[in-house]
Amino acid sequence: MIAIGNDHTGYALKKAIIEYLEERNIAYKDFGCGDITSSDYPEYAHEVGKAIQNKECELGILICGTGIGISIAANKMKGIRAALCHDCFSAEATRLHNDANVLALGARVVGIGHAIKIVDTFLNTDFSQNERHIRRIQMLEE
Ligand code: RB5
């Protein structure tokens, strides 16, 4: 199950990502927001983060204007590793090396077509299970 959340700036991109998920029968839970009325990105970061912490969802996607605020908010939560990625190389590397469990996107930074490719890369890359990466990820929690 994929958790998805966004502020008002991310609403249009969220809808495109949901279309991508539905076309592929990928289960998701939408934590809002549900329109373009001004909203506070930490609220959605916290909802998506909680869904991952309580194992309701395995991975999350968070969107704000830059992707920065919403990733900062998510990364303050225990066990959340949110990666702000605006290219496919980073999206792949953060799954392989960091076992990132949240992809953050800036809707004002990337176009929808590019963002979908980044989402596709993130969702289709597994953690490497490499010992050195496991050790480093454990160090993040210390
Ligand atoms: C909203 O104007 C904007 O500040 C927010 O979407 C995000 O970019 C914050 O980091």
Image (cartoon, rainbow, N blue to C red):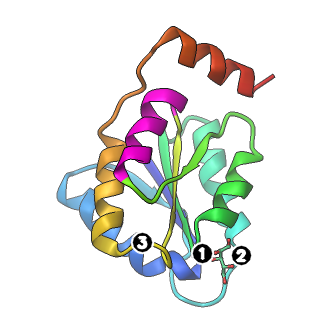
Residue 7, numbered label:
1
Q: Amino acid at mark 1?
A: Asp
Q: Is residue 11 above or below residue 80?
A: below
Which residue is depicted at the point 19% across and 52% down?
Answer: 24
- Decide which of tag 3 and tag 1 comes sooner along the chain: 1
x then y, percent, for residue 61 = 49, 55
x then y, percent, for residue 93 = 43, 36
**In this rendering, which labeled residue sits more in front, label 3 or label 1?**
3
- The residue carrying pointer 3 sits among few (fewer than 14), some (14 to 19) or many (20 or more) residues within 10 Å by Cα, namely some
Q: CA distance from mark 1 to mark 2?
A: 6 Å
Q: Which residue is mark 2?
A: 40
Q: CA distance from mark 2 to mark 3?
A: 20 Å
**Ligand 1 lies in quarter:** bottom right
Displayed quadrant of residue 20: bottom left
Pick out the residue farthest to the bottom. Answer: 37
Q: In this orientation, does residue 101 appear?
A: yes
For ligand 1, tell me if the residue under mark 1 lies within 8 Å: yes
Pick out the residue farthest to the right. Answer: 142
Residue 110, numbered label:
3
Q: Amino acid at mark 2?
A: Asp
Tell me where the magenta segment starts and ends, as one range. Answer: 88-99
- Describe residue 2's horizontal placement relative to residue 70 as left or right: left
